[in-house]
Image: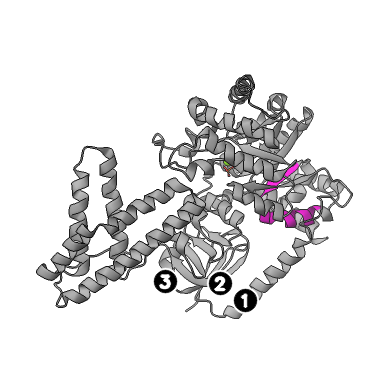
Amino acid sequence: MSNKIKGIGASDGIALAKAYVLKEEPIVISNHQTKDPEQEIELMKKALERAKTDLKNLQQLALEKLGGEKAAVFEAHAQILDDPMMSDEIITLIREKKYNAARAIKEESDKFAATFDSMDDEYFRERAADIRDVTDRWLRYVLDLLVIDLATIKEEVIIVANDLTPSQTAQLNPTFVKGFACNVGGRTSHAAIMARSLEIPAVLGLKTITESVKQGAMIALDGNSGDVEIEPADASLWDKKAKNYLQMKKELNTYKDKTTVSKDGNDKMLLEGNIGTPKDVEGVIANGGEGIGLFRSEFLYMDNDHFPTEDEQFEEYKKVLENMGDKMVVIRTLDIGGDKKLSYFQFPAEMNPFLGYRAIRFSLDRKDVFKNQIRALLRASAYGKLGIMFPMIATIDEFKAAKDFTLEQKKLLEKEGIKVGDNIEIGMMVEIPAAAMNATNFAKYADFFSVGTNDLIQYSMAADRMSEKVSYLYQPLNPSILNLLKLTIDGAHKHGKWAGMCGEMAGDAKAIPLLMGLGLDAFSMSASSIPLARSIIAKLTIKETQELTKKALELETAEQVEALVDNLLASK
Ligand code: PEP
Ligand code: MG
């Protein structure tokens, strides 16, 4: 029976496919004795082959996407399964003690892992975890349970999960993953941001979707409205929705190759793309991006098992700068902490990690890590037009410390005879209300601002951006937010600096007229939002957006502002 639920539309598009529920069923081993040992041995061998094939595929994928070091992990896993001693012992248990295949594998692998567990050397103790990991896969095949490997999905599915981590999201192949639906998250959670950069429709904040949908059931979703239907009553309605959506996309595509110009001929505004990896540049260029307004460098750190070295980072930054030619590329220094964790670094336990040791606070404390990144950025600056920006700046002292450190490193590099660009701009994110309130002073020192509305709104409203319970407080159109934006943009302009925005608000169709009216210079967004943004700008004159903004700043609620914008857009 069809079941309709509503969540938060997090990445545009319509999807209809089978659900792939990311919920591993527990492995339960029974003690029953087998009457047919040879059949159990056959089952165990077939499962072993399937597990080995998986590991080979994963090794290959890791090699293509993540490099040799990650791939070596899967090779080591395959070697564990190749060990004939373990298989021989398992066969003996099945033949002589009449164990069922699963029980024999479990008993033997536990014994094997326990040997490693008892060793002093940490390296060998970690191998115990590897043995458990690979035998889990083997057991799942023996017991006919679902084995979850996002990277190896080979049929069209919609992923249904509690949440998706950035690294899980990065593994998704958009050819097969048609959408995703999660219990938690909202428009600005990182799963949403990644979904938009992969152009996969997503609905988040669905609370209990993992409980409501069965493995393999048909499911449909609308990533704009947030509507989800499990076992749709009329699939043809969804097909029609998908067709309309594609038609609209096609019309908007004509804006990909145009320049950004308002109806009255203002062509000073830039529409740029946000990226997480150098690969995302393709999407920005394909959608007509006029630069990169935000490269979230933390993804280089999260998709790794060590702090990336200066050289490793240099190569990635250089790729982006070269591919963007003479267009501006703003790279944000490491914004780690909060919900963005590293597998190889233990953050201190804090009551409020979003308000804690993170981003520039971490970088200024860990100059060793910061230095590698700054040197890599400065070296890469010789290959294009680079803007370096610091995240989570709250005080003038923090900004000055980060900027001074960067300039010192620049001098040192030049002394070493290493080429550094001569047109680097050093700016900051405005995402803490304290920075917005003090923007005029910051603008004396910063070359540019980029407003991070995802955080600016969460901190202004004191509403966790990851919590669907308080997602109603994500109110970009609230006059309080508009006033903070006005302070920021006016502050920049007072000192002849430019003000951009790289939070999700920059690509929000209803916010764009207001941002034009406030005088925003650069709008950076998910690449797929660029054509729509350009089509909106083309319909409006600066004068009418200024009038709109003036009225909006005097209103009381986000709803009132929304009605005002709707009214203007409807008249176009
Ligand atoms: C923001 O806070 O708006 C922003 C762009 O940064 P992030 O979403 O990575 O926190
Ligand atoms: Mg932020």
Mark 2 Cβ and ligand 1 under 8 Å apart: no
Amino acid type at mark 1: Asp
**For this rendering, which residue is in front, 504 or 305?**
305
Decide if residue 526 is in sight here: no
Q: Residue at x 77, y 45 (%)?
A: 270
Amino acid type at mark 3: Lys
Residue 501 located within the stretch drawn in magenta:
no
Q: How is the image coloured?
A: one colour
**For this rendering, which residue is in front, 92 or 169?**
92
Compared with 523, 509 (above or below) is: below
The disc, 3 or 2, on the residue closer to the chain's N-terminal end is 2
User: Which residue lies under the disc numbered 1?
Assistant: 239
Mark 3 Cβ and ligand 1 under 8 Å apart: no
Q: x and y percent of residue 72 in the render?
A: 39, 49
Q: Residues in magenta? A: 522-537
Q: Which mark is residue 16?
A: 2
**For this rendering, which residue is in front, 195 or 468?**
195
Could you say whether the residue bearing mark 2 is in a helix, strand or loop?
strand
Q: Residues within 10 Å of mark 1 (few under 14, many from 20)?
A: some
Amino acid type at mark 2: Leu
User: Which residue lies under the disc numbered 3?
Assistant: 214
Q: CA distance from mark 3 to mark 2?
A: 15 Å
Q: CA distance from mark 2 to mark 1?
A: 8 Å
The disc, 1 or 3, on the residue closer to the chain's N-terminal end is 3
Q: Residue at x 83, y 60 (%)?
A: 571
Image quadrant assignment for residue 329? top right
Q: CA distance from mark 1 to mark 3?
A: 22 Å
